[in-house]
Amino acid sequence: MKKISSSLAIAGMFILGTTTAMAQEEAAAEASKGFTQVLKEQFIQGGPAFMGIVLLCLILGLAVAIERIIYLNMASTNSSKLKQQVEDALASGGVEAAKEVCRNTKGPVASIFYQGLDRVGEGLESAEKAVVAYGGVQMGQLEKNVSWLSLFIAIAPMLGFMGTVIGMIQAFQKIAAVGNLSASLIAGDIQVALLTTVFGLITAIILQIFYNYIIAKIDGIVNDMEDSSISLIDMLAAHKK
């Protein structure tokens, strides 16, 4: 009898040890999964319909954001240096020399300066109007496609919520068909439904960060354009005297 009890105890310890080892191996395997792998699995579980559209919003939004950031960085110039060069050129070589400086400088500030210098022969008022009008054109170029970015920010969470609502409807349809409220019956559908909302919100958060950076960059360039335009009119007024 003692032998049987000892054998059962040993067998129990062996089974317990095996179960614990298997649980530890599963936990280690789950922990070893990278963030990308987990994200991929969750994305697949969310379903291709709404998750694919949300992913498309993220890709298009990032494409617009990257294009705008590159354009705005190229549009940023050292306006203080440009104003000094234009002022020196006006003093030494006149309007044509100043226009040559603007031709050789990239950015909206240099373009606005060129338009003002090109119209200064028609009078100071005409030059000021040209600067204001062309400043509006340059502002439109800076803000180009930014509205698409705000659209993707708004659409992504809406699509996520729509996927969640549809998933919840399907879960309740299962309950109605079976006639039994079982957590295991609808847990999978609810999980899939909530995943679409999570990915929609993640997409909106990522794009919102880029959007705020782009808007801040545009505001800085526009303020620089306005300040430089005033300085140009003052320089032209002084040169006319």
Image (cartoon, rainbow, N blue to C red):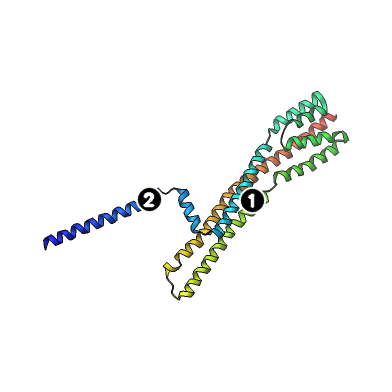
Quadrant of residue 125 within the rendered picture: top right
Checking the image for residue 29, the label placed there is: 2
Residue under label 1: 149
Locate the N terminus by quadrant: bottom left
Q: Nearer the viewer, residue 135 or 124?
A: 135
Locate the C terminus by quadrant: top right
SS at badge 1: helix
Checking the image for residue 135, the label placed there is: none
Residue 59 spot, x, y in % from top left:
59, 50
Please indicate whether residue 17 sits to the left or right of residue 200 in the image.
Answer: left
The residue at 64%/40% (across/down) is 70
Would you place residue 114 above or below residue 155 in this image?
Answer: above
Count neighbours of disc 1 (C-alpha within 10 A) and say few if under 14, some if 14 to 19, many if 20 or more: many
The residue at 81%/33% (across/down) is 117
Of the residues shown, which amino acid type is indicated by label 1?
Leu
The residue at 73%/46% (across/down) is 140
Would you place residue 190 above or below residue 117 in this image?
Answer: below
Q: Nearer the viewer, residue 62 or 140?
A: 62
Of the residues shown, which amino acid type is indicated by label 2?
Ala
Comparing labels 1 and 2, the label whose residue is closer to the camera: 2
SS at badge 2: helix
Residue 33 spot, x, y in % from top left:
42, 49
